[in-house]
Amino acid sequence: MKNNYFKYIKISLLSVLFIGISACKSDDDDFTFNGLEESYSIDRFKVLSIPTNVSANVTWSINDSIISQNSELEFISPTVDTYPLTLKVERNGNIQTYKSKIIVNQETGNYSKYISKVLDFKPAVGQFINDIPEYENGNNSAAMIQKANDYLVGGNSSMVTLGGYGGYVVFGFDHTIPNMNGRDFKVLGNAFFANGSTDRAGSCEPGIIMVAYDKNKNGKPDDNEWYEIAGSEYFKNTTTKDYTITYFKPNSNKVPVPGNEYWQTDVEYIKWEDNKGNSGFKTKNTFHSQSYYPLWLSDQSYGFSGTRLQDNFHDQSGSGTYWVGKSYDFGYADNAPNNDEASNIDISWAVDRNGKYVKLPGVDFVKVYTGVNQEAGWLGEVSTEVAGAYDLHLK
């Protein structure tokens, strides 16, 4: 019995020693980084990726300024230059330092700072739907996306309407817009401030902005999460997350129900419901007689989900004659005049689904959708308009 006891202890100790040695060996084997190349070369507005594949504390620096602490460096620059690169890897209290440089070259050909392609277009219901852009008999979704493309691509862009809450457009650029210090791109709309306004109010119809980075470089926003630009209202309790609305196709044979105001042609025109227990109707007005439901959609209902902003329009006159929409501080489309700083967007404001800020090297795709579900009297539904967009770094 005694011999068996000591034999068990001996075997156990050897097992522990073996496991400890194996663990140390495994930890050492994890470190397979072979150092940096002498230099790396990349064109302007393209992302250079340098993986290390190490599970350690990693710090990337240029001129003693930390630019990343991720295992894989994703570097982009809008400027032709040579950047001295330093990588520090800390493991078990030991720091190893590697030196290199990044050479940023002038690209071949010319990039456009403007939208290069519209990838999707699906407006919600509204008084300008089927007009901006114009629906023609037989048009399908692809045809309407192409029309939105014709409206928005390039430096001579015109305007598309997104209708009520949730209506959206998705567009891309021919290069990655870099995430630099300060604001990175501008979204154009038709917002304006009223003459003499001291509170930045007038006609502001804020749209939520989403961004995506084309990591797999296939020209499609299909490989990464969309990130929301967290504007000034994002973290406020007046903003509703995970909001969903459904619009129901109107019955063309239904007898209109006129309202008490001269402009109310049908106050029970298009029914809507949301996931908060609310419902109502979008009113048809006397100023626009065409269908407010997208005629290229055959479904009897359709809907959208996202972040809903607090209503921003109010009847300043008190009699229904003068409605004004207040601009939010920052981070939204069609929320301020095009020459205002508030129409410029910082990629660093992007957050993930949990509201955590993310560090993107840049963005290739932008989605804009109407962020308010409100009727502003005779002005009709609050509807974001998009009239173009451009990179603020590409001169």
Image (cartoon, helix red, strand yellow):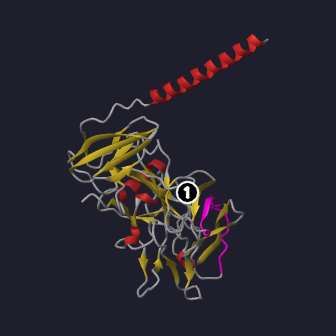
Image location of residue 208, percent across then percent down: 50, 62
The structure residue drawn at horizontal position 66% and vertical position 64%, both measured from the top left corner, is 271
The structure residue drawn at horizontal position 33% and vertical position 49%, both measured from the top left corner, is 61
Question: 303 and 299: which one is in front?
Answer: 303
List the single residue furthest toward the front.
Answer: 2
Whether residue 260 is situated above or below residue 4 in the rendered picture: below
Image location of residue 176, percent across then percent down: 34, 50
- 19 sits to left or right of 3: left
Question: 100 and 288: which one is in front?
Answer: 100
Image quadrant in which the N terminus is located: top right
* Magenta residue check for 257: yes
Residue 86 visible in the snapshot: yes
State the extent of the magenta-drawn residues as a range: 237-259
What residue sits right under mark 1 in the picture? 355
Residue 117 visible in the snapshot: no
> What's under tag 1, amino acid-wise?
Gly
- 55 sits to left or right of 249: left
**Snapshot quadrant of residue 157:** bottom left
Whether residue 362 is situated above or below residue 92 in the rendered picture: below
Image quadrant in which the C terminus is located: bottom left
The structure residue drawn at horizontal position 65% and vertical position 78%, both measured from the top left corner, is 259
Image location of residue 248, percent across then percent down: 64, 59
- 250 sits to left or right of 87: right
